[in-house]
Amino acid sequence: MNQKHELVIIGAGPAGLAAAQYAARANLDVLVIEEFSAGGQSLAIDKLENYPGILEPVSGFQLADMMRTQAERFGASFISASVLAVKKCDRDFAIDTSEGSIEAGAVIVATGAKHRHIGVPGEEAFAGKGVSYCATCDGPFFRGKRIFVIGGGDSACDEAMYLAKLSDQVIMIHRKERFRAQKALASQVNANPHIHVLFNTTAVEIKGGKKVESILLRNVVTNETHEEPADAVFVFIGSDPQTGIVPFVSKDKTGSILVDDHMRTSVPGLFAAGDVRVSPFRQIVTACADGAIAAHAASQYLDEVQGNAYR
Ligand code: NAP
């Protein structure tokens, strides 16, 4: 494959899909490159209820499917490939992918973020054997079982609520004395009779034979440890931005890409949108807004370099 497009969008999560729709509707020749399937992290959402205008909750998959169809109807093209590197060559970009090289006049990086691991003994060994990072994917395997959820943010609370529909024995472990999550989510968790919360607690080790059988916990105040029987451990302790393909752009100390109000990175013609960029609040609605702004800015940038800018 050796093709050239005006705009290439890397990643088809909510930010990439919104950018594709806006850019294609602005008549740009747009290619979206996605590694797996459209939706990104939103695919793990069972019931999305805080996206504006959605009165009846939809799943992350349903929203992503509608967004992709909408972008395609405006003329965006999609391919499945792994992006290996992005290079700036004079004014254009060369994008090395698993399917060949692609040239672009401008690039929007919307590669999102990947879940973090807690890094305790047993976590890697029991991945897929009771340790999971996606409740909607793996929760149904643990119907009625004793499920531990690690984390105290929005993701942990959301996913614990989902798991509490499958089991009345959901135990949340959070290292602080109260949740980091939005108050609305924290209150739902606290009011759920199927969820028991252990604050000031961390996981020390995940144990078992062929699958998870127990978890060793430590109270961070008393330093006491105790072992609890467990069938599953779901880890939701945040995520890291996926920026490996653009090592040359400026980032903050957490590794998120620095952008201005127009989603412009430190490299002219390269934009970033969604969870991969520095952001005070990561939501589907904010990712979509980023995508729309990045698409608009990319369109203006291309007009400038092509000598078509409106004066
Ligand atoms: P997050 O907000 O960064 O929260 C991560 C949680 O994991 C924190 O409570 C943190 O503890 C804990 N943690 C981090 N490292 C840990 C470790 N090594 N061991 C034990 N605990 C650890 O991440 P998130 O919950 O994935 O949310 C990410 C973003 O997506 C946020 O902006 C969030 O608002 C958004 N989001 C929104 C929704 C929604 O609106 N429904 C749903 C999901 C996600 P500390 O609190 O002590 O740091």
Image: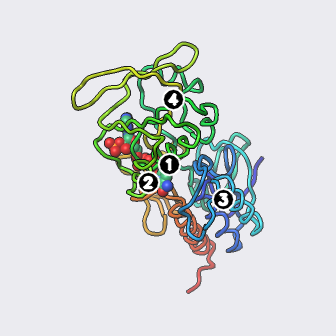
Contact (Cβ within 8 Å) of mark 2 with mark 1? yes
**Mark pair 3, 1: CA separation:** 17 Å
Residue hosting label 1:
158
| Mark 2 nearby-residue class (10 Å; few <14, some 14–19, many ≥20) | some
Disc nearer the start of the sequence (3/1) = 3
- CA neighbours of label 4 inside 10 A, class few (<14), some (14 to 19), many (20+): some
Q: Secondary structure at mark 2?
A: helix
Q: CA separation, marks 2 and 3?
A: 21 Å
Is the shortest distance between ligand 1 and the CB of mark 1 under 8 Å?
Answer: yes
- Residue at image position (29%, 41%) is 176
Note whether 6 is above or below 229 in the view shown.
below
Position of residue 262 measured from the top left corner of the image (x, y, whole percent): 48, 69
Q: Which of pointers 2 and 3 indicates the residue nearer the eye?
A: 2
Residue tagged by mark 4?
146
Residue nearer the viewer, 191 or 182: 191
Residue at image point 61% right, 35% down: 138
